[in-house]
Image (cartoon, helix red, strand yellow):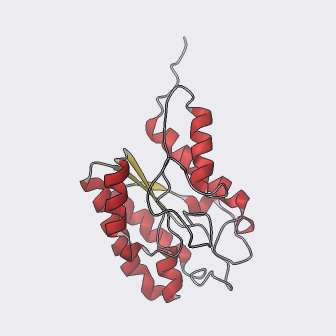
Amino acid sequence: MTAGTTSPALQRTLTLDAGLPQSYVFKLQTLVRERYTAQTIDVFNAGKAGNRAAEDRGRLNDAIREANPEVLLLMEGANDLNQVGNRDAISPTIGALEVLIGEGVSHGVRVFIATLPPQRSGGKGHAAEFIEDFNEQIRRMAPDEGATLVDIYTGVTLDMIGEDGLHPTEAGYQRIAEIWLDALKAAYELPAPQTT
């Protein structure tokens, strides 16, 4: 989902390109540049279609070393859950997410972790019936691991999920980008000064 495509043909190294135009990362880069015109904020897309959180520790470390980011936006686990297709995937996937958060924190990166968007049964949405349970565990785990929670699930509706039951529509990716931006604004923007 982070890559914004079902195609496996993604770049293996990070560039200033935030990915495919339909990805939420590309849309987030656009929103960030529009909002923070006096700053240069780069958004890197390290998403790789088909990857699982359980196998991404080394890839995450490489991406952190390459980009040297201040912030890590982490939304992983859909492929882990859908590959197994039942609740048995929840606990090991949460464990993998804890490891990924720990890697970010150990590199001095502020980690934001997102719940997964809803899924529709059938097609590729094999985790539809237990995605809420998985997301509830992310909500409980995030503060314990030192991560900032971003609740994508409650902000994305099923009509924003495409026909395959798993991947968002372009409107869904836009909404995900907006939710990420709201989380960044809440974390980093100072409140407007009050006038008396």
Front residue of 156/105: it is 105
Q: Which residue appears at 54% of the width and 50% of the height?
A: 17
Q: Residue at x 51, y 85 (%)?
A: 83
Which residue ends up furthest to the left in the rendered image? 106
Residue drawn at (46%, 59%), measured in percent from left and top? 46
Quick one: 136 or 121, which is closer to the camera?
A: 121
Residue 36 in the image: state x and y as whole percent: 55, 31
Answer whether residue 25 is visible to the viewer in this image: yes
Looking at the picture, how far across and down is residue 57, in whole percent?
Answer: 33, 68
**Is residue 29 found left or right of 53 in the rendered image?**
right
Q: Residue at coordinates 37% horizontally, 57% vertically from top-left?
A: 63
193 with respect to 98 (left or right): right
Q: Quadrant of residue 117?
A: bottom right
Q: Is residue 144 visible?
A: no
- In the picture as drawn, the residue positioned furthest to the top comes out as 196
Q: In which quarter of the image is the N terminus?
A: bottom right
Is 8 or 105 nearer to us in this picture?
8
Q: Quadrant of the C terminus?
A: top right
Q: Compared with residue 32, is residue 82 higher up or lower down, i.e. above or below?
A: below
**Where is residue 82 shown, x and y percent of the image?**
54, 82
Counting every numbered tag in the picture gives 0
- Residue 16 image offset from top left, x and y in percent: 50, 47
Measured along the vertical axis of the image, is residue 181 above or below residue 46? above
Asked if residue 98 is positioned above or below residue 52 in the image, the reply reads above
Give the side of residue 90 with respect to residue 144, left or right.
right
